[in-house]
Image (cartoon, rainbow, N blue to C red):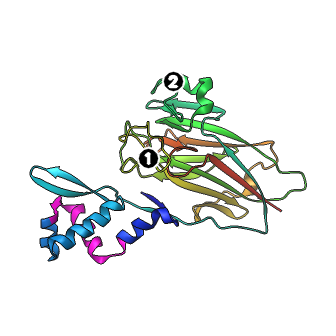
Amino acid sequence: MEVDISKESLEVYKALASSTRLQIIQLISEHQLSASEIAQHLNLSNSITLMHLNKLADAGLIQFKRHGHKKISVLKVDQINVHFPNLIYPQFQTYVTEVPVGHYTNYSVTPSCGLAGATNYIGKVDTPAYFMDPNRMNAHMIWWTDGFVEYHFPNYLKPDDQLEMLDLSVELGSEFPFSNNVWPSDITTSINNVEIGTWTSTGDFSDIRGKFTPKWVPDNVNQYGVLKTFRITNHGSYLDGQPFSEICLSDLNATSPTVSVRFAIKENANHKGGCTIFGRGFGNYDQDIQMKLFYS
């Protein structure tokens, strides 16, 4: 589950702000229990237990299922990622560009693969030839198992501009036929043909619907990814604010008229779980692939 610092995520924080509800989560992570069984384990009344369960269900953390004659509680999520607002660097000016997911300039993909637009799939699913269909420009979500897709961003830096930092922001996930919330995949990101590093996605998520994923998308296919921010500076690269690799701005050709970005599942990846890219109108973040060039 993806949450942020906004009112929309407040119910999740409220649901977790209880030692009793944390005990309930621990219990049902190990056993499928009814409300009365949970009440016995925690020495609570049935009515108090149901109140706690309903708060967890309203926050999207658990769901109720029938198991024979019993109504049991089942966890819906196995991890929660909290996204804080990005730091602002007012001393730098910026050029900001968003490239739609379907506007890739090069690709080599293998099934399972496909493209999705606002109202339907684009072309035939699991047919790589449709990655060159003219309608691909309308894609807002793409996915593939092996290979790569590459994008080009305009480089608006003028001769007198000094590049100080580059940010690349994109919502990524693994790829599994339909979905699998525990399906690790090593996704390697390169800029101007220089590998920035590899991030391991933990799954192809469909535990809950994506905030912006269109209604026509079935519930049992990938719904959202994880928003990742790659930052390249003069002293190294960072992923979501944490040290990522030793690649610096000086390793990139910042004078080229375009900046290339490649997302790949490499042949020697330890976890070859595919890649899904979510753009505007899909997933949990209503944005395309965004690049910020900070300059002085």
Question: Circle 2 — which element?
Answer: loop
In the rendered image, residue 158, in percent from the top left (x then y), is placed at: 87, 51
Side (left or right) of 113 relative to 88:
left
Badge 1 amino acid: Asn
Which residue carries the number 2 mark? 123
Please tell me whether residue 11 belongs to the stretch shown in magenta: no
The span picked out in magenta is: 16-35
One can see residue 82 in this view: no
The Cα atoms of the two marked residues, 1 and 2, are separated by 31 Å
In the rendered image, residue 166, in percent from the top left (x then y), is placed at: 71, 56
Question: Circle 1 — which element?
Answer: loop
Which residue carries the number 1 mark? 270
Residue at the (47%, 32%) spot, across then down = 113
Quarter that holds the C terminus: bottom right
What is the magenta segment's predominant secondary structure? helix
Question: Relative to 64, is 132 above or below?
Answer: above
Please tell me whether residue 18 belongs to the stretch shown in magenta: yes
Residue at the (73%, 67%) spot, across then down = 89
Badge 2 amino acid: Gly
Side (left or right) of 160 relative to 128:
right
